Image (cartoon, rainbow, N blue to C red):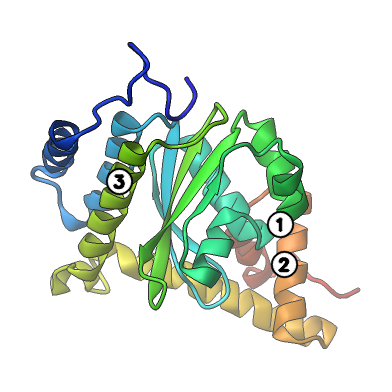
Amino acid sequence: MRPGDDPGGGQDRGAGTGGYARAVGAIAAGLRDAEPAQVPERLCAVAVDLLPVDGASVSLRGDSMPLQLAASGARAARLAQLQATLGDGPCHHVLKTGAPVLARDLADDDCADRWPVFVQQALGTGVRAVYALPLGSTAVCVGTLDLYSGSPGVLSAHQMHVALLLAGVMTGALMDLPHDARDADKGWLSGLAADHDRVHQAVGMIMAQLGVGADEALARLRGDAFAQGVTVLEAAVDVVSHRRRFDSR
């Protein structure tokens, strides 16, 4: 089904006040009894249920790269990790601008020109459209909600409203986490921080090995990860564990 198509008769599925209310009810039902750490993944699942998309992922802004927080499934998780590894893709554009990116058909020349490697890889997984929405605002964008569809097309006005509602709920959930969810021993945020630290440590080691700056070292790490078919975090772990060096020794 193409995003925006109605499965039963040509009008926007669930459009109107009643449809919006049903979306709010579905979000509430999906989050019922959820622990703070479960909210992002639950919302990704709700997004797939409410919208004509096949997958959803959420990533948080990091100093050097976005950090994947949750996904609706393995393919969505892989696409989020791919964008982090490449340093390219709709997610990165949203993080730079704070504005949504609605790539209605990745097979179009303009998408291939903007994100050549990401587009090639995404099309290879069967994804044809990506809708990336900011978490936060244009002034303060804390992350992205990325929606993936196997069919090209646009989101209708109602579907876009629902997608923005989901992004708003996701932002609120991240901002309003109780303090115990941030506890170093309990919180999922501590795991993300540890992942981020490993990447920074690997970048520092590559800088020392090659005598290059931080941007060059991160580019080398990303290129190595892509060449090996692993995530940038997995490549960083190899560097930190001394299983991979970037000099001749």
**First along the sequence among labels 1 and 3:** 3
Residue type, label 1: Ala
Quadrant in the rendering for residue 23: top left
C-alpha gap between disc 1 and disc 3: 37 Å
Q: What residue did someone put label 1 on?
A: 225
Image coordinates for residue 199, horizontal then vertical, percent: 58, 71
Quadrant in the rendering for residue 78: top right
Q: How crowded is mark 3: few (under 14 residues within 10 Å), some or many (20 or more)?
A: some
Element on which disc 3 rests: helix
Q: Which mark is residue 243?
A: none
Q: Tell me what residue is drawn at x 59 percent, y 79 percent.
A: 201
Q: Is residue 224 above or below residue 7?
A: below
**Does any portion of residue 234 appear in the rendered image?**
no
Q: Tell me what residue is drawn at x 14 percent, y 47 percent.
A: 34
Q: Which mark is residue 161?
A: 3
Image coordinates for residue 73, horizontal then vertical, percent: 43, 36
Image coordinates for residue 106, horizontal then vertical, percent: 66, 39
Q: Tell which of 15 and 241 is nearer to you.
A: 15
Q: Nearer the viewer, mark 1 or mark 3?
A: 3
Q: What residue did someone put label 2 on?
A: 221
C-alpha gap between disc 2 and disc 3: 38 Å
Q: Are marks 1 and 2 in contact (CB under 8 Å)?
A: yes
C-alpha gap between disc 1 and disc 2: 6 Å
Q: Quadrant of the C terminus?
A: bottom right
Residue type, label 3: His
Q: How crowded is mark 1: few (under 14 residues within 10 Å), some or many (20 or more)?
A: many
